[in-house]
Image (spheres, rainbow, N blue to C red):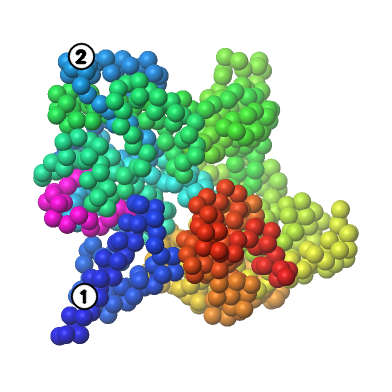
Amino acid sequence: MAMAGDVKKRIERLRREIRRHDHLYYVLSAPEIDDRQYDALFAELKDLEAAHPELVTADSPTQRVSGRPLDVFSTVRHAVPMLSIDNTYSAEELRAFDERVRRQLDTPEYDYVVELKIDGLAVSLRYEHGRLVSGATRGDGEVGDDVTANIRTIKAIPLSLLDGDAVPAVLEVRGEVYMPTRSFVELNRMRTEAGESPFANPRNAAAGSLKLLDARITATRNLAFFAYATGEVSQPLARDHYRMLERLRAMGLPVNPHIQRAKNIDEVIEICLAWGPKRFELDYQTDGMVVKINRCDQRDILGATGRAPRWCIAYKFPAERAETVVESIAVQVGKSGALTPVANLAPVSLSGTTVKRASLHNFDEMRRLDVRVGDTVVIEKAGEIIPQVVEVKTERRPPGTKPFEVPKKCPVCDSEVVKDETGVCVRCPNPQCSGQLKERLRYFAGRGQMDIERLGASLIEQLVDRGLVQGFADLYRLRKEDLAALERMGEKSAQNVLDGIEDSKTRPLWRFLAALGIRHVGGQSAQVLAEHFGSLAALREASREELEAIDQIGPVMAESIYGYFREPRHRAVVDDLLAAGVQPQTEAARSRAGAFSDKTVVVTGSLENFTRQQAQQAIKDAGGKASSSVSKKTDFVVAGAEPGSKLDKARELGVTVIDERQFMEMLSGRAN
């Protein structure tokens, strides 16, 4: 019994520690330990709970992800309606709002709280006795969808609140689920690599992720959360809004750090206008500011209309847009055969970059907008990231223009196109299409996959057009004389390419899996598969049930993986690669005597040749430990552009700092 008591105490202690570190990382942005140390705590808790299932509780950090997809969302009626907010678009409209407030309160003694308007999805979280019991979307304001399983996967949302006895018995927290910009860019990269359509903006990505029926997929989307209000509360938290937010923060809930108080409407306007240009510095999207009366009793006096409170208003930032002309419309063929229309534009400056092309997403969207060659169009960057056409100035359309016809044949191989199962995407069904082959080869050789140095797009074009490469394995059969005969390819350059191809033969298993281009499988899911099965042979023989049982692998992905390795054509591709000398390395088989063997390395700032994930994986591939925080135990800090406080801390502690060139030299073994 004493031993059982010791285990229970250890489990409770681990839970407290993990919750504390989650709070430090996700709420305070002040981590005390690195990822490896956190993972060790989590693994110990998971092992103890597995050995003692009777001690598992619903609010344990290990219980964030449910194991089974839902069939459908149930609905939740909000105890307190989730109202909309009226919008304003100018300083004059903000002053008009202030005049209405002043008249109704009949006093000048009031102040405001000004918050960033996060561009995400509004949700309501219900805590009972400090434990999360449900989460729901706003829906129509009265009734929303029960998305509790997905809410629980968001690590910024505590399953148990801090502040002990001070937490009300019932507390509904209102806030915004959003997707950080870096997560959005990475998700779209993986979707594109997996042959799926990218999300148009972070808001759509967050909403789509929160409405997935499989919480295991939601868990991979890196969603975040900011609390900004309350719904039903069994006892008041504070007499004004600002102090209420401080109480929520003390309970362990993430509250946006940029909330400001304003004594009057002049200060409100000053804050709103200042955030117009500053918002681009944030790692999440915001489309405006929310202005709220601070005191709760004055809010009660002001009341609400049928749809919106009278005590708050949203100030919307003007979207940065530009006009340009569509010079031509091209059709791209992706590696999965998907045909995508792209508008080639007269160059125009937008949000600090020169835009020459804009995706039209698909032919249904192009038809809805009625984009034609010669049209003057309005473009904006979706979520300040992706250029897209949002409006056509039809009144300025040149005479004689015609709607762009959806291709009936592939523009590369002339095969009859087909619509996919969704009815939206048009695909070339010909697996021998050279357009698809070129895209597959570019992807296969890319940095996030087999990472073949010097095998760029122009060289791939020549290799395919001259018939030297008709599949992945042909790359490994190339001879120096084959390459030396190509344009701008001397003997030394040819040897460099062959060396890069040779080096790629022993890439880690996860890179090999990602490079195959299995639909729905990107780099992250490839790593999950490699770690779970440990070998290519085991994965190839896995059943649907085995695949679906893996955390982060949902039924759609499982079916895609299972089908890929049962398709004779795909099995032949893998067999051909193995016969050509490619030997994917498992974690156990890979040498740990790399440049960073047993070294702890932190990456800070933006690198030109690596995403953050790629740099961290390169460190691991070289035998090192990739950490997110600098400490006395850190051996190297890799500093890119705009490195921030981690570089300062490294210098303060005397940690060795290297730049990206030195980092790449160490990885390649060329460093002194």
Q: Where residue 478 sits in the image (x, y, percent)?
A: 79, 67
Residue type at mark 1?
Lys
For the point 58% across and 75% down, the residue is 597
- Residue type, mark 2 in image: Arg
Residue 31 falls in image quadrant: bottom left
Q: Circle 2 sits on which residue?
A: 103
Question: Residue placed at 68% from the left, 28% from the top?
Answer: 346
Please tell me which residue is depicted at 23% across the width and 79% down the height of the picture. 7
Q: Which residue is the site of mark 1? A: 9
Left or right position of 168 against 246:
left
Residue at 46 percent of width and 35 percent of height: 279
Residue 440 drawn above or below residue 367: below
SS for dot 1: helix
Vertical position of residue 83 compared to residue 638: above or below: above
Q: Is residue 256 visible?
A: yes
- Left or right side of 178 for 166: left
Is 193 inside the magenta-drawn segment? no
Foreground of the two, 641 or 89: 641
Magenta residues?
153-173
Q: Main secondary structure of the magenta part?
A: loop
Quarter of the image where the N terminus is located: bottom left
Displayed quadrant of residue 464: bottom right
Q: Is residue 158 magenta?
A: yes
Q: Quadrant of the C terminus?
A: bottom right
Dot 2: within a 10 Å radius of its alpha carbon, few (fewer than 14), some, or many (20 or more) residues? few
